[in-house]
Amino acid sequence: MSQARIAIEKMKQSGMRVTKQRRALVAYLDKSGRFVPVTQLDRYMRSQYPGLSHDTIYRNVKAFEQLGILESDVENEQAIVKLQCDFQHPHHHHFICTNCHRVQEVKMCPLEYFEDQLPGAKIASHNFELYGLCAECAQKLGR
């Protein structure tokens, strides 16, 4: 089953209405496969549904995030989102290509490494991402 279909099923299971606008939002993020600035998502949705308000779009982004449908982050002080890439393992990390912005899932979590360095500390949460050139871009750019 595609990530978009899983996201739609999660909406249904939660009791959230599956509107054409919500389907379009999920489809847009699914097609992208990358982190997208929320402002870009907002522009796209408003171009497709001119009567749709900024507030409605941002409320849906927040609701999708709470359902685990979206992953969010901040890049250059700007909120970015993408469709959850692994519904089976929602806790995961990413490698993000700084050239093409392709996102690859990283299976290993470094939390234990940091916990070992902070004896007695109670870590509440963490966020771990790697940035650089993906293999394809590194080859294209000769690096």
Image (cartoon, helix red, strand yellow):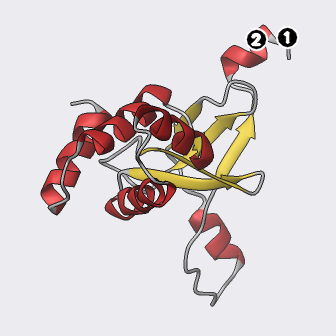
Q: Amino acid at mark 1?
A: Gly
Residue 117 higher or lower than 97, as above or below:
below
Q: Amino acid at mark 2?
A: Gln
* Percent position of residue 85, x then y: 41, 40
Residue 66 higher or lower than 12, as above or below:
below
- Is 86 or 121 nearer to us in this picture? 86
* Percent position of residue 73, x then y: 60, 55
Identify the residue under disc 2.
139
Q: Local crowd at mark 2 within 10 Å, few (<14), some, or many (≥20)?
A: few
Element class at badge 2: helix
Give left or right: position of 139 versus 53.
right
Name which quarter of the figure residue 102 lies in.
top right
Q: Local crowd at mark 1 within 10 Å, few (<14), some, or many (≥20)?
A: few
Q: In the rendered picture of this protein, how many numbered marks are placed on residues?
A: 2
Name which quarter of the figure residue 131 lies in.
top right
* Percent position of residue 61, x then y: 44, 55
Identify the residue under disc 1.
142
Give left or right: position of 77 versus 88.
right
